Image (tube, rainbow, N blue to C red):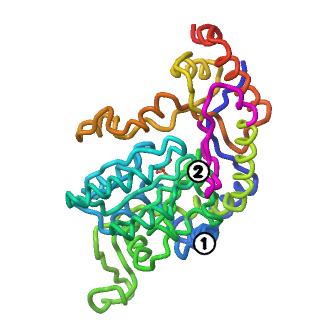
């Protein structure tokens, strides 16, 4: 039987394994020096001043929102074409969540629609406190325009860069925070580089950095200059606010530090696989990923859209899975999840994201994808789209 080709997977080298073993043999499994080294590596790569490692991007989005004071009575806006975590973080803080529909070309939040919604929200006195642009598939949002709107309307910008470490925008690394307050990366195994589970928040803002480091560890400080009264002694610490245990371990950071050394190589490999897909799929009735001129994607995902109603999207998807090709669909529009429908969202609220959802398929893309496997994806898809009977046969 042919091997199953997943849509994404990690790439672990002997050097990665050695790095983890080295931490296991050291004095510190957590709260040790490897965390700081990993944080510095990520900050330096991105050109940001500070980085805070946390247990996941979800945790990073949560403390990121809290650090900017998001709370009850506030609004967070994000894209409907994202993983639920980009929206849930607003609800964790007691804020309300709303969405801005996508640009039908890049599948990122439409900045034109963002601006239109801000104009309306200003009239109603319901401007957002935090906007979360999501760099979908690894392609940066139009951050300069979003930054200009943030200055004009006074909201904070938290980039959900879970897909986009290694990506570039206007010739600089995503995560430099030139146009945002914070950016969050995910190190889940399907993402660009991995720590098993993990996330990093980057920022240029020293105050936010201080708050983030405190929120990640119970809201506790051990620094006398941050305490409300003189220290009682060497044992003393103070809890100043309600925080969490969102600390990444040094074991994970050891893996992350080793993986960071191959980040550029990973992105280069993804880019070349994407370019081959572009060439090999160009004659099929598909929309291939469009790239904005200011961006250089990290290619977390390679998403095609079916142009034709027949053979139906669902049949093609099922036939690919039946052929042991692990296609996926990123994303089910968040507002159509039962939980969000219960908050009052409906079908039809964000038509571009919904239309995209009816047509999109994420093809396998990861550094270890072999030419032979890539060719199998292409030939099965070609057969399916070229011959409707192949779809019926494969799904029969
Ligand atoms: C993966 C992902 C997250 C969550 O990342 P975790 O590290 O698994 O918490 C959030 N947002 C987006 C867009 C993601 O793809």
Residue drawn at (44%, 42%) of the image: 81
Looking at the image, is 64 positioned above or below residue 49?
A: above
Asked if residue 215 lies left or right of residue 371, the reply is: left
Looking at the image, is 375 positioned above or below residue 73?
A: above
Q: Residues within 10 Å of mark 2 (few under 14, many from 20)?
A: many
Looking at the image, is 89 positioned above or below residue 63?
A: above
Residue 194 in the image: x percent, y percent? 60, 53
Residue drawn at (37%, 90%) of the image: 225
Whether residue 284 is in magenta: the answer is: yes
- Quadrant in which the N terminus appears: top right
Q: Residue furthest right?
A: 372
Which is more toward the observer, 100 or 200?
100
Residue drawn at (20%, 57%) of the image: 124
State the extent of the magenta-drawn residues as a range. 279-303
Measured in 3D between alpha carbons, the distance from the residue under mark 1 to the one under mark 2, in whole angstroms, is: 18 Å
Asked if residue 76 lies left or right of residue 110, the reply is: left
Res 138 label = 2
Q: Give the mark, 1 or 2, whose residue is nearer the N terminus.
A: 1
Q: Residue furthest bottom?
A: 230
Which is more toward the observer, 37 or 310?
310
Q: Residues within 10 Å of mark 1 (few under 14, many from 20)?
A: some
Q: Kindly state the secondary structure of the residue where label 2 is placed.
A: helix
Res 47 label = 1
Residue 193 in the image: x percent, y percent? 63, 53
Cβ atoms at labels 1 and 2 below 8 Å apart: no
Whether residue 266 is in magenta: the answer is: no
Magenta stretch, main secondary structure class: loop
Residue 86 in the image: x percent, y percent? 41, 51
Res 169 label = none
Locate residue 172: give its quadrant.
bottom right
């Amino acid at each position: 039987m042919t091997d199953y080709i997943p849509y994404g997977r990690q790439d672990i080298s002997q050097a990665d394994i050695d790095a983890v073993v080295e931490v296991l043999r050291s004095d510190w499994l957590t709260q040790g020096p490897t965390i700081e080294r990993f944080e510095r590596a990520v900050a330096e790569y991105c050109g940001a001043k500070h980085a805070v490692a946390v247990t996941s991007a979800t945790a990073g989005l949560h403390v990121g929102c809290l650090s900017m004071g998001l709370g009850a009575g506030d609004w967070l806006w994000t894209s409907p074409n994202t993983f639920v975590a980009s929206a849930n973080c607003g609800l964790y803080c007691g804020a309300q969540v709303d969405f801005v529909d996508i640009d039908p070309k890049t599948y990122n939040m439409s900045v034109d629609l963002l601006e239109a919604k801000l104009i309306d929200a200003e009239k109603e006195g319901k401007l957002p406190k935090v906007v979360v642009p999501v760099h979908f598939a690894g392609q940066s949002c139009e951050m300069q325009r979003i930054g200009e709107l943030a200055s004009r309307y006074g909201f904070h910008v938290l980039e959900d860069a879970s897909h986009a470490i290694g990506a570039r925008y206007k010739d600089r690394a995503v995560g430099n925070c030139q146009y945002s307050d914070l950016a969050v990366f995910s190190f889940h195994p399907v993402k660009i580089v991995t720590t098993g589970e993990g996330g990093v928040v980057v920022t240029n803002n020293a105050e936010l950095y201080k708050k983030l480091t405190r929120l990640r560890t119970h809201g506790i400080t051990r620094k006398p200059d941050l305490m409300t009264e003189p220290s009682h002694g060497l044992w003393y610490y103070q809890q100043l606010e309600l925080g969490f245990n969102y600390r990444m371990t040094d074991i994970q950071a050891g893996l992350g530090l080793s993986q960071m050394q191959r980040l550029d190589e990973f992105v280069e490999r993804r880019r070349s696989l994407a370019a081959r897909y572009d060439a090999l799929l160009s004659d099929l009735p598909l929309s291939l990923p469009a790239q904005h001129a200011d961006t250089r994607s990290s290619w977390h995902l390679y998403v095609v859209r079916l142009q034709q109603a027949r053979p139906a999207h669902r049949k093609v998807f099922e036939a690919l899975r039946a052929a042991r090709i692990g296609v996926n669909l990123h994303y089910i529009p968040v507002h159509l999840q039962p939980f969000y429908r219960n908050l009052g969202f409906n079908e039809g609220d964000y038509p571009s994201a919904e239309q995209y959802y009816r047509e999109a398929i994420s093809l396998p893309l990861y550094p270890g994808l072999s030419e032979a496997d890539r060719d199998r994806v292409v030939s099965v898809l070609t057969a399916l789209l070229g011959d409707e009977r192949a779809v019926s046969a494969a799904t029969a």
